[in-house]
Image (spheres, rainbow, N blue to C red):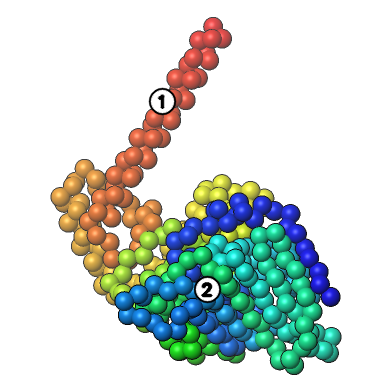
Amino acid sequence: MNKSINYEINVPKILKSISENNIIERIIYEAILNSVHSESTIIECRINFENEQLLAEDRYKQLKNIIITDDGIGFNKKNLKSFKTYSSDYKTKDWGSKGTGRFSFLKCCNKVYYESEFYEERNFIRKKINFNIDGLSTEDLKPKQKQETILILENFTISLNIDDIEKNAKNVIHKIYPTLALIKKKNSLRRIRINFYRNEELIYSKDLEDVILLNSKKIKINYSNKDTKDFILYYSLEQIFEKPLQESGYCAGYVNVKEFEVRIKLRKESYVFFLYSEYFDEFVNDERTDFNGIYPKERTLNNPISWEIINEELKKVLNDILNKEFKDIGRHNEILLSTIKSAYPFLDEFIDLKTSNIIGYLDKSDILKSGYNKIDQIKNNLRSIRESFIDNQKLDNEKL
C-alpha cells in the first residue's frame, strides 16, 4: 500500500538556509548520526562514483550515490511518525535533536529514499520511504527477514575529489566523536562500528571500543533555598582521537550543542570537557546549535538558572580538576600576576581573576584584559548613574 504525505512547511526556504560549504560531510554526518540514534551496531557508508576507473588526470568525479546501511531499529510506527513530523520532540530527550538535519540531504541531490526493515508485532515489515521537497511517500515491500535500514542518496548536483573521501570520513568521525564518547560513558554495553567505503574499498573505520572512556564529575547547582538542578561534567585530558581534539561544550543528550563560554587554556594538544544536564534538554533549539530561554543573567520561574550561575559553578569544578592535574598552574599565574601588577601598578585594584572567563595557564593579555574590563565596567556603571541622575533632575525641574 502506498501513502503520500505533504509537508506543511516551506522546504525550499529551509534548504536556502543550509550552507553549501562542506555539504557532503554534513549529509554523511547527519545520516550516520541518525544511524547512531537508531541503536545500530554496524553502520556502513559507501560513497560510489560514476566512473570506477579513477583517472589520475581528473580527480574530481561525479558522485553516483551515497548509501548508508545500518542494523538499527528502523522505521517502526513510532520512528516513522517522528520522521513525518518536522521538528519532532521524539528524539529530544536522549539526543537533544528534533529531526531537522534530514533536509540537508536535499541540498545537493535530487533523489532520496530509504528501505527499512524492522521487527514489529511479531513480524518483519519492510518499507520504502521516498523523501523530497514536496513531502514523503511510503510503500510496502516484501520482507527479507533481516533488520536493516538503507539510505540511498542519488542524482547529485555536485562533483567530489576522490582524494578527499578519506579526509571527509575522518572529519565526520571527528565531529561525531564527542557523541561516541558520551555514549560509551553513559552506556558501557553499547557496541558501534562505523565503516567508510570508496566504491568497494574500505578506507576508514572506527569502533566504539577504541573510544576512550571519559571521566565524570557531578555538579549540583542551587537556584533557591531548597531546589537544585543536576549537571554532569564529562571530561578527558588524554588524546582521544587520531588528531588533536580540543573541544568543550554544553550538551543536550549525546550532542555537543554550544561551545563553553569559559575559555580553557592548557599546554596540551588534546582535551575534552562536556557539561550535560536535563535542564539543557529542555531548552535546546531545533538545529542543535543553541539554547533558547536560558538567559545571560536573568532568571524566571520557568528558567531558574542563568548562564552566569552555570558558568560560575563550571569554573569552580574546572579549576579544581586542572589544579589537581597540573600542579604548576597556580604558581605560573601567581608569578605572572605579580609581574604585571609591578609593571602596571594602576591596574592592581582592578585585576580580579575570579571574574575572568579564562582558566588554566593565563598569559599577559588575559590578565591585562581582566583589569581593563573591570575599568570599563566601572565606567559604564558611573555613566548609567550619571544618566539616571540627569533624568531624575529633569523630572524634578518639570514638576517645579
In the image, farthest residue toward the left: 343
Name which residue lies at 39% across and 72% down.
Answer: 60
Camera-side residue of 267 and 145: 145
Side of 273 relative to 295 (left or right): left
- For the C terminus, the quadrant is top right
Side of 225 relative to 389 (left or right): right
- Per the image, label 1 sits on a secondary structure element best described as helix
Q: How busy is the neighbourhood of tag 2: few (under 14 within 10 Å), some, or many (20 plus)?
A: many
Q: Quadrant of residue 59?
A: bottom left
In contact (CB < 8 Å): disc 1 and disc 2: no
Q: How busy is the neighbourhood of tag 1: few (under 14 within 10 Å), some, or many (20 plus)?
A: few
Residue highlighted by disc 2: 28
Measuring from the top left, give residue 69's x and y in whole percent.
60, 83
Residue highlighted by disc 1: 386
Name which residue lies at 62% across and 77% down.
Answer: 151
Name which residue lies at 66% across and 60% down.
Answer: 133
- For the N terminus, the quadrant is bottom right
Q: Is residue 226 visible?
A: no
- Amino acid type shown at disc 2: Ile
Q: Is residue 378 above or below residue 167?
A: above
Measuring from the top left, give residue 323's x and y in whole percent.
34, 72
- Amino acid type shown at disc 1: Arg
Camera-side residue of 296 and 209: 209
Measuring from the top left, give residue 47's x and y in whole percent.
50, 79
Name which residue lies at 19% across and 53% down.
Answer: 340
Side of 342 relative to 360 (left or right): left
Q: Is residue 75 above or below residue 337?
A: below
- The span from disc 1 to disc 2 (Cα, nearest Å) is 57 Å
- Per the image, label 2 sits on a secondary structure element best described as helix
Q: Is residue 347 visible?
A: yes
